[in-house]
Image (spheres, helix red, strand yellow):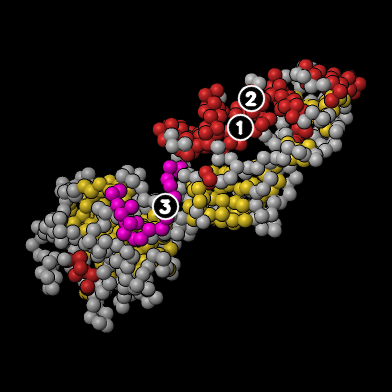
Amino acid sequence: MMKRVLFIIAVFTGLQTSVWGQEKQMARADEAYAEYSFKPAIDIYQKVLDRGFESADLLRKLGDSYYFNANYIKAAEYYQQLEQNYPGEMTAEYYFRYAQSLKSMEDYQKSEMAFKRFSELSSAEDARVKRFKSQQDYMDEIASNSGRYDLREFQYNSVYSDFAPTYYKEGLIFSSDRDTGNLARYRHTWNSQDFHDLYKLNADSISENQVTKLSNVNSKLHESTSVTTKDGSVIYFTRNNITERKYKRDEKGFIRLKIFRAKWIDGSWNELEELPFNNDSYSVAHPALSPDEKTLYFASDMTGSLGQSDLYKVAINEDGTFGSPQNLGPTINSEARETFPFITQDEILYFSSDGHPGLGGLDVFATNIENSNYTKSVINVGQPVNSSFDDFSFIIDEESREGYFASNRTSGMGGDDIYGFLETRPLVFECLQPLSGTVRDRISNQILVGATVKVIDESNTELISAITNSEGMYTLSCDCNQGNFVRAATQGYIPAEEYLGKSDGKPRVIDFYLERETVTAGFGDDLAKLLQLSTIYFDFDSFRIRPDAELEFQKVIAAMEKYPSLKIVANSHTDSRGPDAYNLWLSQKRAQATVDYMISKGISADRLQGKGYGETKLINNCDDGERCSKEQHQLNRRSEFIILE
C-alpha cells in the first residue's frame, strides 16, 4: 500500500453499592416527649391536607417526606396530585422525582411519560436517562461505542490510494497518487506506485473538473495531509524533505517528512516556507489547527517522543511565528504510533493509533483535550469507522455530524480509500466531577459532624459516599456524563439532595442545610420558625385575615391540637407609616383577629394570647422618614407565634 511506503520513507507511520430504596425510613419521634417536639411534618401536613387546605407547597413537602423515606407509592400519589392540581408548580426536579418513584414501583410506562415531561422542562444539557456504567474491558468498551456511524460511499475514490481528507471552502482537499493525465509521472522505485499529491474537490465553483490538483504546492515527492485556515488564506501541509527540488536524507538514508506553509495570494499558493521546528533528522507531519487557529497540532518522532510517533502542539503567534512544540503527554501518546490529529470546534481531538487498545492496525480514537477530569480520556470510536485494518485521517463537522476518514480495508477500490459517514450518536467521555461542601443545621447553622453524603444514580443505586469531618466538610466525586443525586443525611434530620446533570466536570461546591426531624421547643421560641411557616402578612391599614394566610394558620392549629398543653402568644406588627398610636391600635386588632380566627377553629381561648407592638419592632430600616418600597413595608406587617408554655 502506498500509505505504508510513505510511512517507511518517513521512518514513522505518520499515523460500596446498595439500593437507596432499601434505606431505612426515618425514625418516628418518641411519643413521650419531656419537651415539645415537632416534625415538619408528615402527620401535621397530612392532617391539614385532610381538612381540605391544599397548596402546591404542601403537596411538594408531603411528596418529599415520603420520597426521602423510600415510600415511593405515597410519594408518587402526592406528586401526581401536585401535577394534576398545580401543573404550573410542577418543576422539572419534581417530575424527575415522580418518574423515579414510578420507576421504583415498576410502573415504567408512567415513569417514561413523567421523564418525558421532565426532559421538556429541562435544559438541553441534562442527560438523566443514562445509567451508571461500571468499568468494562476494552472490547466491551469498543462494542459500546460501535454503531454510531452510518458509512457512506465517497464517489471520488480511485483505484490508487486516496486519503487525508480535510475541509477546504465548500469542499475538500485530499491526498492521492491517482493518474490525472500528466505525461510525466513520478513513481516510487519500491513499488512502482506514484508519489502522492494534493487534490481539491468541489472547492471552487469556477472549476470545470470536480477533482483537480492544487497549484504551486505539489512536488516530485510526497504531499499528504493538510489543513487550511477557515478563510482559506493559509495552508499547512506535509511533504517529504525537499528544498529547491532536491530531497534530503538523514544520516540513515531516509527522507523525512516536514510541514510547510503557504499563503493564498493573487489566485494561487505562494510564499511557501517550511516550519522552523522541522528537522532533517526526524519527521514532522500531519498538521491540524485548533478552533481559534492559534495552535497547530502535529505528529513527530522528534527527540523526547514516547514512541514511534507522538502528537504535539505548538502556539502560532500573532505575527506568524511559532512557540516551542509541546508533547501531549502519556495519556494520549504511547510507545507506538499516534498520528493524524484533527481538532473539532468543541476541542475534541481525534487521532489514529496502534498503541491504544483497538481492533487491529491503526484505529481512530478521541479525547477531550481541554478537560482533565475525564477518567477515560482516550476512547476508541468503535466500528464501523474502525476495523481490523488501518483507519486514519478522521475529520468531522460537528454541526452536520458528517465527516470522512480513510482506510485500507479490503472493501475499497484502491490501496487506501476515503469513506464518508454520518454520526448518529455522539461520543461520550467518562469523567469525574469533584464535589465538596459542608452540612449544617438549617436553623442554627451549626456544622453537622459525621453526616453522610452519598452520590446516587437515577436507578436509586448508591455509587459512593463520604462522611463529614470535624469541620462539617465532605469531598467526593460523581460521573459527570450522567444524572446523579447528591444526598446528605444524618440522624435526627430530614435528608436533602441536589440533582446534578451532565456537566463539563468542573468542581462543584454543594452546601447542605438540613431540617431537623424533631425540633425541641421551649418558652420564647417562635413556633413559625420551628414549623417553617411562611410569614403571615396583613394588607395595608387592615387587620383582616388574608386567604393566603389560612394555610399557615392551619399548620399552627394542627400543632396545637397535637400538643394540648401548648400555649402561645400571637404578636402582631405594623409598618412605620401612620401615627404611632394608630399603629399600636392596628397591631392589637391584628393580634386579636389572629386569636379570634384560631378560636373559631376550635382552639381554647385560655391557650391563646394576642399582643400588638405597632411599629416598635421593625425588621428593616423602614422607619419614619425613610423611603422604602411597598414590598419593604410589607415585611413589617406580620404576625408571630411565641411559645408561652
Q: Quadrant of the N terminus?
A: bottom left
* Sooner in the amino-acid sequence: mark 3 or mark 1: 1
User: Where residue 318 sits: x, y (%)?
Assistant: 44, 59
Which segment is the magenta one? 127-148
* Sooner in the amino-acid sequence: mark 1 or mark 2: 2
Q: Say above or below: 363 vs 305.
A: above
Q: Few, some or many C-alpha atoms within 10 Å of disc 2 (few <14, some 14-19, many ≥20)?
A: some
Instruction: Say left or right for 413 vs 403.
Output: left
How far apart are labels 3 and 2 at the CA level?
A: 42 Å
Q: Secondary structure at mark 3?
A: loop
Residue 615 visible here: no
Circle 2 residue: 49
How far apart are labels 3 and 1 at the CA level?
A: 33 Å
Instruction: Say left or right for 250 vs 296.
Output: left
User: Where residue 474 sits: x, y (%)?
Assistant: 62, 55
* Sooner in the amino-acid sequence: mark 3 or mark 2: 2
Asked if labels 1 and 3 touch by Cβ distance under 8 angstroms, the answer is no
Circle 1 residue: 62
